[in-house]
Image (spheres, helix red, strand yellow):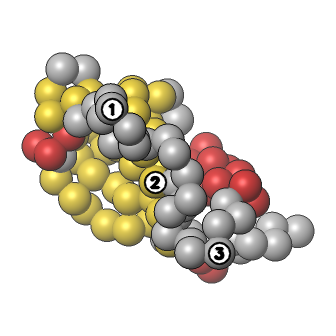
């Protein structure tokens, strides 16, 4: 049973490992304010996914490739806020679609 996130909530054509990470994100996301999401981009010549935690999280967004290899993290709170992946600003990424949102 997928409880907080079933197959109809995830966009078609999403790689299976990304689907599993979304299910896990939905399970650990307990913030009443919500806000967790997964967005698909084109960045550095490949499709990448931004796993954005809920509004209560202190961590930034995890950026992965189609095989769920972590490329890095962007954002965050406090004194250190990273905005680059592999030395390139993630603002250069081209938004494609929202895969899932809470």
Residue 54 on image: x %, y %: 54, 61
Marks 1 and 2 sit apart, C-alpha to C-alpha, by 19 Å
Q: Residue furthest front?
A: 79
Q: Which mark is residue 17?
A: none
Q: Is residue 20 above or below residue 45?
A: below
On screen, residue 78 above or below 25: above
The residue furthest right is 1
Mark 1–mark 3 distance (CA, rounded to whole Å) = 26 Å
Check residue 79 in the rendering and tell me which mark sits there, or answer none: 1
Seen in the picture, residue 47 relative to 68 is either above or below; the reply is below
Quarter of the rendering containing residue 74: top left
Contact between labelled residues 2 and 1, with CB atoms less than 8 Å apart: no
Q: Nearer the viewer, residue 51 or 94?
A: 51
Residue at the far left in the pictured view: 92
Per the rendering, the mark at residue 32 is 3
Q: Quadrant of residue 40?
A: bottom left
Q: Which is in the foreground here, disc 1 or disc 3? A: 1
Per the image, label 3 sits on a secondary structure element best described as loop
At which x and y percent is residue 92? 11, 43
Q: Position of residue 52 (x, y in %)?
A: 46, 54
Q: Earlier in the sequence, mark 1 or mark 2?
A: 2
Which of discs 1 and 2 lies nearer the camera? The answer is 1
Left or right: residue 27 compared with residue 90: right
**Foreground residue, 29 or 96?**
29
Mark on residue 52? Answer: 2
Percent across and percent down for residue 31 are: 65, 67
Secondary element at tag 2? strand
Q: Which quadrant is home to the N terminus?
A: bottom right
> Is residue 86 found left or right of 89 in the rendered image?
right
């Amino acid at each position: 049973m997928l409880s907080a996130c079933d197959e109809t909530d995830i966009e078609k054509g999403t790689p299976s490992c990304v689907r599993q990470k979304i299910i896990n994100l939905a399970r650990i996301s307990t913030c009443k304010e919500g806000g967790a999401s997964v967005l698909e981009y084109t960045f550095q010549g490949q499709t990448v996914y931004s796993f954005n935690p809920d509004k209560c999280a202190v961590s930034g967004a995890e950026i992965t490739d189609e095989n769920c290899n972590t490329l890095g993290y962007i954002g965050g709170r406090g004194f250190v806020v990273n905005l680059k992946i592999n030395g390139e600003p993630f603002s250069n990424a081209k938004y494609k679609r929202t895969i899932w949102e809470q």
